Image: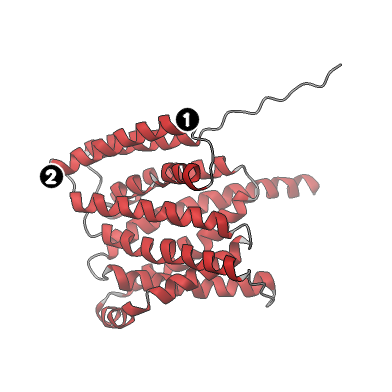
Amino acid sequence: MNQNATLTRRALPVAAIIATVLMWASSFVLIRWSAGELSPGPLALLRLVAGAVTLSVLLLIVRRGRLSLPSRSALGLTALYGVIWFALYTLVFNLAGHYIDAGTIAMVVNLAPIMVGIGAVIFFKESFSPRLFTGMVVSLCGIGLISVAGSTGQLALAGLGIALIAAFLYAGGMLIQKLALRHTDPLTATWLACAAGTVVLLPFLGATVEEVQTASTPVIVGAIYMGIGPTALGFWFWGYAMNHFPTGKVAASTLAVPAVVVLMSWLTLDEVPPLLGIVGGAVTLTGVAIAQLRRPVRQVSPAR
């Protein structure tokens, strides 16, 4: 019985990572698929409303109706990362889906961990390691190859630029989240951030009502799913995995997202990035992997 319980405890964090990767990958495909029926603002608002409702239910269940709000300064940080990550990033992310394929967007956006590493050096005074520098150089070479694909007409350069802006917003949200999580738990922070992002996107309410009336049911269901799955459950599962595995190991799992996106978009949308874009994406992700590598800690044998 104890052995089964131990196996279950070990399997659950792995299952959480796999589920998160699949859900986050599916959002890239769904955004590309929805681009013909929902514009970026309404799609983002539908997603965040669904996410905020789901997170509210989760919070009531997990906290049993008792909510502990962070301090005023922490509340401001949480709202700020919600505006940047949940609102602006989602909006720009959706816009990129109108220009380039889902796989290319995923490869460019996954440059964010490099940006987070650089931001940590600038804002948190962390050391600029040779590993981070090497990863940055390799990733920039990969982005260069993807850009060449755009300059030859294989990809829309506007879409690449928008996806790169999304990566910057993603990284900025992550850095501010790191500060916010010093004062509150992941579930509360995600709920507050999603709520803040929803409020910022309320100017799109009128357009959302209009577009929902003409959009197909599968597209609307897909938008709601993105709020329930990738936004609410995805971030919750991610936090659960972070509490059971080293940060670097969990973060490295996101490198699988672009590959899953390419496979999903090929099977469902019949689209794949151009060959040069795939090569550039592989080089970019290699650079991100290099930057995230951690040297194994040597265990010192006790003196005998």
Instruction: Kindly identify the residue that appears in the image at 59 percent across and 47 percent down.
Output: 14
The three-letter amino acid code for the residue at tag 2 is Gly
* Distance CA(mark 2)–CA(mark 1): 34 Å
- Where does residue 112 sit, x and y in percent of width and height? 41, 47
Q: Position of residue 51 (x, y in %)?
A: 48, 70
Q: Residues within 10 Å of mark 1 (few under 14, many from 20)?
A: some
Nearest the viewer among 142 and 80 is 80
Q: Nearer the viewer, mark 2 or mark 1?
A: 1
Please provide percent x and percent y for residue 184. 63, 63
Q: Which residue is mark 1?
A: 131
Q: Are marks 2 and 1 in contact (CB under 8 Å)?
A: no
Whether 14 is drawn above or below 67: the answer is above
Q: Which residue matches tag 2? A: 153
Q: Is residue 13 above or below residue 58?
A: above
Q: Is residue 222 left or right of residue 104?
A: right
- Single out the residue that lies furthest toward the left: 153
Q: What residue is rendered at 60% in x and 58% in y?
A: 181
Query: Residue reaching furthest top?
Result: 304
For the point 19% across and 40% down, the residue is 149
Specify whether residue 203 is in view: yes
**2 or 1: tag closer to the N-terminus:** 1
Task: Name the secondary structure under disc 1.
Answer: helix
Q: Quarter holding the C terminus?
A: top right
What numbered label is drawn on residue 236? none
Image-based side of 191 in relation to 111, left or right? right
Classify residue 218 by image quadrant. bottom left
Element assignment for label 2: loop
Q: Is residue 282 visible?
A: no
Q: Amino acid at mark 1?
A: Arg
Q: Position of residue 128 (x, y in %)?
A: 49, 34
